[in-house]
Image (cartoon, coloured by chain):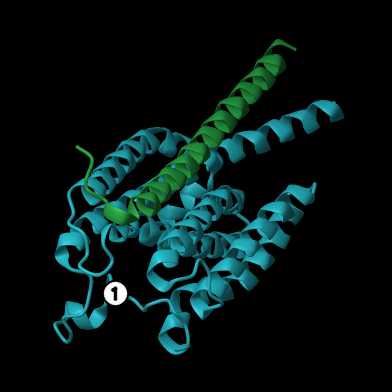
Amino acid sequence: MMPELGKYAGEVLSSYAASLVLLAGLVIVSLRASRKAKAALEALEKGRQDG
Amino acid sequence: MRLNALWEYANPVKFMRLTDRVLPVVSVLALAAMVVGLVWGFFFTPDDFRQGSTVKIIYLHVPSAMMAISAWFMMLVTSLIWLIRRHHVSALAAKAAAPVGAVMTIIGLVTGAIWGQPMWGTWWAWDPRLTSFLILFLFYLGYIALWEAVEDGDTAADLTSALCLVGSVFAFLSRYAVNFWNQGLHQGASVLRAGALVGDTEERVSNVFAVPLFISMAGFVLFFIALVLLRTRTEIRLRRAKALIARERLS
C-alpha cells in the first residue's frame, strides 16, 4: 500500500518519521507529567484529611 | 451570551470541571483529524509536477509552522490577561502552551530544511521568514527557561509575560515578513491566498492538495488545544500542591 515516492522517498519519509516522533514524545511527556501531578496532589489532600 | 460569563473559567475549580468534560472530546477530534489529514495527504494525493513527492511534506510543514506562530499569539493574549486581570489560570495556560509551541517550531524547522534541500538546493537560508522563525524558536527556549528559573510563581508569570510581548515581534515577522520584505527564498501565502479565494488569481495550492491540508491544519489546531488543556490542568494541580505544602509548613 506504500505510495510511490520516487527519488524523494528519503526526504518524505524522514519528515514524517521525525514529526511523528516529536509529536508522540510531546504527548507522552505531557501525559506522564499530568499523571504525576494528579497523584502528588491526591496524596497531599489525603494527608491533609487524615492529619 | 454575556461576555463576562467567560471570566468564570478563570476560576481554577470551574476550569477543571469544564475541561474534565471537554478534554476527551477535543482529544478524540484532534486524533481523528490528524489521522485523516495525514493519511490522506501521505497515501492518497498525487505528486506535484515539479516538486515530485516532496509536496507531501506540506501536510506537516504548513500546519506545524502555523501552530508555532499561533501558539505564541495565544500566549500573548493569555499573558496580557494575566498582566491586566491577574488570573492565574491564564498565566498557567501560557506556560503550558510554550513547550507545545516549541515542538511545533522544531517540526516546522526540520521539515522545512528537509524540503528546502531538494527544492531550493539548501537546507537553510538567512531569509527573513526563516530567520525570524528561528529567533522565535530561541524565544520559546528563553521563555521556558525563564519560567523554570524564577522560584516565585507570580514573579515568573510577570517576567515571562514581558518576554512574551517582546517575542511577539518575531511571531509577527514569521507570519508577515514575506509580505513586505521581498528578498527571501520562502514563498508568500499560497494556501489561504485572499486573491485566489475571491478569484483574482488562479495561483494557489490546488484543491487536490488543499482539502487534506485543511483537515491536517484543523487536526493540528485541535491537537494544540487538547495538549494545552491537559498541560494547564497539570500546572493548576502543581500550583495547588505547592500552596498546600506551604500552608502545612506554616501550621
Q: Quadrant of the N terminus of chain B?
A: bottom left
Along the line of sight, the residue nearer the viewer: B123 or B67: B123
Chain letter for the cyan colouring in the rendering: B
Q: Residue furthest front?
A: A7
Residue matched to label 1: B190
- The residue shown at (21%, 59%) is B47
What residue appears at the point 57 percent right and 76 percent down from the top-left corner? B169
Quadrant in the rendering for residue B18 = top left
Amino acid type at mark 1: Ser
Q: Which chain is green?
A: A
How many discs appear? 1
Measuring from the top left, give residue B105's x and y in whole percent.
Answer: 51, 58
Tell me where residue B22 sits by quadrant: top left
Of residues A41 and A3, the one nearer the viewer is A3
Q: Residue at x 43, y 81 (%)?
A: B178
Q: Position of residue B183 (x, y in %)?
A: 47, 88
| Residue nearest the viewer, comparing B121 with B248 | B121
Quadrant of image for the C terminus of chain B: top right
